[in-house]
Image (cartoon, helix red, strand yellow):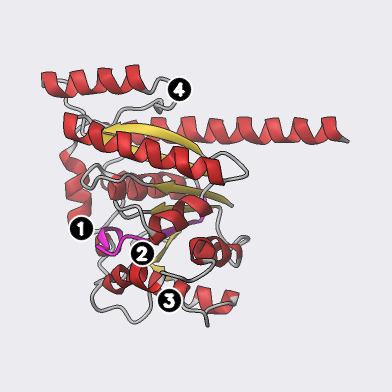
């Protein structure tokens, strides 16, 4: 099971769109995908027409000490508009976890332990993280093997990216295995000088981290959201979906290269 997270310490940069679009493209490949909404705002949950204010069960339950079995985790799964995409929704009650986590041990590994129960059920897990460094983002970063950091191609978003990169440096100092992360430029509009200059600055500042795709402004994402379907179902040929298709191909190549490197390392150590 591949676990990817999407995170940034700034909101409005396209996190949920990234999660939903990549999930749709993976599902279109015949893969089973689990979406985990760790954002108390519940944008991903609302996308698939669930109300974060009214859910009886949600990702909040993962943090209950009594939820320890695979059966209990599976009870949190809900269907989506795509047959191969399953969701663990968010609830607004998750906003209280920060206060409850104070003084509690092991709170940063809750999601990792929960996903271990679902290891053989899904091919991919995509985590939508809140735009705040706290127990929920820490769980997302601890659980994932690869991180996508969407950043809007405008100046203020780049300043937010700087905070996220500092956070990742801190996280990597605490991890035994370095977290691979990729910066994804979003909302790119080649007609505006501000967008072009911002993209140039991202490429110059983070040449080794930038993903091999640029997501343009695309109103079709909004249209897909309005009816609760993944964008590739709404219009697979739209510019935005094509950009995410390019991103996915590149990410899967990265995964294949990593697997090959690990296999070679195991052979050499025998």
Q: Is residue 175 above or below residue 161?
A: below
| Separation (CA) of disc 2 from disc 4 | 36 Å
155 horizontally vs 35: left or right: left
Which residue has dot 4 on it? 208
Label drawn at residue 61: 3
> Which is nearer the N-term, disc 4 or disc 1?
4
Dot 2: within a 10 Å radius of its alpha carbon, few (fewer than 14), some, or many (20 or more) residues? some
> Which is nearer the N-term, disc 3 or disc 1?
3
Which dot, 4 or 1, sits closer to the camera? Answer: 4
| Separation (CA) of disc 4 from disc 3 | 38 Å
Which residue has dot 1 on it? 227
**Disc 3 secondary structure class:** helix
Residue 95 at what x, y percent from top left?
A: 29, 68
Residues drawn in magenta: 30-44
Which residue has dot 2 on it? 80
**Disc 4 secondary structure class:** loop
> Which is nearer the N-term, disc 2 or disc 4?
2
**Disc 2 secondary structure class:** loop
Q: Residue at x 59, y 52 (%)?
A: 1
Report which quarter residue 25 is drawn in.
top left
């Amino acid at each position: 099971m591949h676990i990817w997270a999407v995170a940034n310490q700034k909101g409005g940069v396209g996190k949920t769109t990234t999660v939903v679009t990549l999930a749709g493209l993976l599902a279109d490949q015949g893969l089973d995908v689990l979406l985990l909404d760790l954002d108390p705002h519940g944008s991903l949950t609302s996308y698939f027409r669930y109300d974060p204010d009214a859910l009886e069960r949600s990702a909040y339950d993962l943090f209950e000490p009594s939820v320890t079995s695979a059966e209990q985790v599976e009870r949190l799964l809900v269907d989506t508009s795509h047959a191969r995409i399953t969701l663990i929704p968010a609830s607004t009650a998750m906003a209280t976890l920060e206060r409850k986590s104070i003084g509690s041990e092991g709170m940063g590994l809750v999601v990792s332990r929960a996903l271990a129960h679902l290891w053989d059920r899904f091919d991919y897990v995509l985590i939508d993280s809140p735009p705040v460094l706290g127990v929920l983002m820490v769980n997302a970063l601890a659980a994932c093997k690869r991180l996508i950091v969407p950043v809007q191609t405008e100046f203020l978003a780049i300043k937010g990216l700087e905070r996220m990169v500092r956070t990742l440096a801190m996280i990597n100092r605490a991890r035994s295995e370095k977290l691979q992360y990729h910066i994804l430029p979003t909302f790119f509009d080649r007609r505006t000088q501000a967008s072009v200059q911002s993209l140039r600055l991202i490429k110059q500042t983070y040449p080794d981290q930038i993903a091999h795709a640029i997501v343009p402004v695309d109103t079709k994402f909004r249209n897909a959201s309005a009816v609760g379907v993944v964008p590739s179902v709404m219009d697979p040929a739209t510019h935005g979906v094509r950009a995410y298709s390019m991103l996915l191909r590149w990410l899967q190549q990265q995964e294949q290269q990593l697997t090959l490197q690990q296999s070679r390392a195991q052979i050499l150590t025998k």
